Image: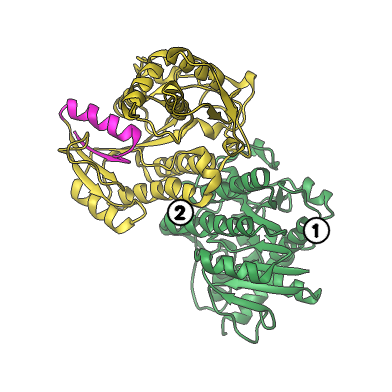
Chain colours: A green, B yellow
Amino acid sequence: MNYLITGATGFVGTHFIRDLKSRGHTIHGIGTHVPSPSGELAGIGFHSMSLMDYKSLHTLLKDIQPDQIVHLASASSVAASWESPNACFVNNTNIFLNLVEAVRELKLRCRVLSVGSSEEYGVLTEKDVPIREDHSLAPASPYAVARVAQEQLSQVYSRGYGLDIVCTRSFNHIGPGQSERFVVSSFVKQAVAVSRKQQKEIFVGRIDIVRDFIDVRDVIQAYAVILEKGKPGQVYNVCTGKGHSLQDVLEHICRRLDIPMAAKTKDALLRPVENRMIVGENAQLRALGFQPQYDLSKSLDDMIAWWQNQISA
Amino acid sequence: MNYLITGATGFVGTHFIRDLKSRGHTIHGIGTHVPSPSGELAGIGFHSMSLMDYKSLHTLLKDIQPDQIVHLASASSVAASWESPNACFVNNTNIFLNLVEAVRELKLRCRVLSVGSSEEYGVLTEKDVPIREDHSLAPASPYAVARVAQEQLSQVYSRGYGLDIVCTRSFNHIGPGQSERFVVSSFVKQAVAVSRKQQKEIFVGRIDIVRDFIDVRDVIQAYAVILEKGKPGQVYNVCTGKGHSLQDVLEHICRRLDIPMAAKTKDALLRPVENRMIVGENAQLRALGFQPQYDLSKSLDDMIAWWQNQISA
């Protein structure tokens, strides 16, 4: 099978490509960063370009003629979207629109995976969770609006133009290799630094919020199963079905590292609107054959080991 | 009061500016077409620029410091959005995002009118109409997706950043001066041509569809009342509350012109997904003091007179 991966140098992209390579597929990747020739992306067809460059994208798709497009490229930080809403919107919705528009113009017969977000559901209460895919969407951040628009464009391209698009609403990712711009990876990195006496406290935003954290290695298993068996036009929650508060996550990390839980709230880490609780129901995904392999404890252990390796002692 | 009107050279823009001038306001207009110096826009501060040019927009807003921004600029044809989805999206959602982002960055204290569309509701059935503002949104065309994204961005900028934005979902406009790209104006123009023996038949798409047609002069009355009394962050249906099929509209026009109703379906006028019925409830708008002044018959008569004047005999 001939795969095209956007966001190839990103967190999910590198994990996804490693998995595809092990299964012997032809792989092309698009990214804005140039990958190391000795890293995960060695040996794939790598194309350094912006997805906002429609003409280059069109030419590339025409050349490659992919069977599957896994669209992982995204400005996926909710916090960053409050700082730069315009950049967030363009680098989610507009890049996706360019991609499906090129597929439509070229009449490519391929399946497209459109990655969305649990943030699309908006501010939920205890009674709403675990949330099902048929729940109404009420995006409460610039990032969430961008993802809803992407999903609605997927529906229009699927129903109106007959493109084969499968959609996800993916919940919070964790796992080794994640950027410290994301909260759990930031906690682990800071805790490792505290354990090495390199910093005294762990800076946090609100830690009473509850999220459904899914390991990136389970995310790629989910995407593979959705690409293989998902129904065209359908939206799938990609989640574990279990919620954990950031407080619980932080306590677990500190216990593992045998350090006191010295959390300090930093105003800059608070957001204009905060969703207190997001936990998903994954019955549709399990019905396709998905089974999560990583529980929270295993993910955090692997993240601790990864950061211990990254930060020099 | 200091007004800035985007889409100043458009259908609603020219009507809106004529009304503001009669009430003695200071008016700036932004448009991409250069207006005639002797037309409706004579005497206002006119700025020819694209709203995609963020830097120029930012500079202009800083200079003007408007009290009210009436954002009428839009690529508002549903049919055109199926032809050029990308252009439609950029010229609705991205231009709006640029506008509110400039207001946010400059910390302007002004009210913004965000115009949305009845198309946001998607495909409705008899039991859904007249539709209220709390009905779920299910956009079924590229244009509709772009309008939903604009409205959701309005909510995020209103709740997250504290901007003063009032929103509409405006139903199908009619009235003298409307472009023939829109269905009723096309019918009138063609019927006038038939009455003058310049063409034999009237080309149509589906005419069993029902719409809530509101005269542009009532639209500007509605926008004025929403700008004056609307609640920040609120969404208002701008409509008459009455539905008419395109068949009824066409029959009325032909009767008035005393010509046979010779309609011919043209495949190019059919759309990939067609909403059969859109009729709105306007209780919220009436509660602000709005009273429609033009019924369908009066609007069509004025449109016939306008096209008779435009088309040389």
Q: Quadrant of the N terminus of chain A?
A: bottom right
Query: Where A304 falls versus B302 (above or below)?
Result: below
**Camera-side residue of A36 and B79:** B79
**Camera-side residue of A90 and A188:** A90
**Camera-side residue of B84 and B198:** B198
Q: Which amino acid does the dot numbered 2 rest on? A: Leu
Cα separation between marks 2 and 1: 39 Å
Q: Is residue B261 visible?
A: yes
Query: Where A240 falls versus B247 (above or below)?
Result: below
Where residue A65 appears, x then y in whole percent?
69, 67
Where residue B276 appears, x then y in whole percent?
61, 26
Magenta stretch contains residue B17 = yes
Q: Secondary structure at mark 2?
A: loop
Picture residue at 68% right of the left edge, 63% below the top: A69
For disc 1, the chain is A
Viewer-side label of 2, 1: 1
**Segment colored magenta:** B1-24
Q: Which amino acid does the dot numbered 1 rest on? A: Glu
For disc 2, the chain is A
Residue A228: give its label.
Answer: 1
Query: Where A277 falls versus A254 (above or below)?
Result: above
Residue A270: give its label.
Answer: 2
Q: Secondary structure at mark 1?
A: helix
For label 1, count other residues whose C-alpha is less than 10 Å away and answer few (under 14), some (14-19) or many (20+): few
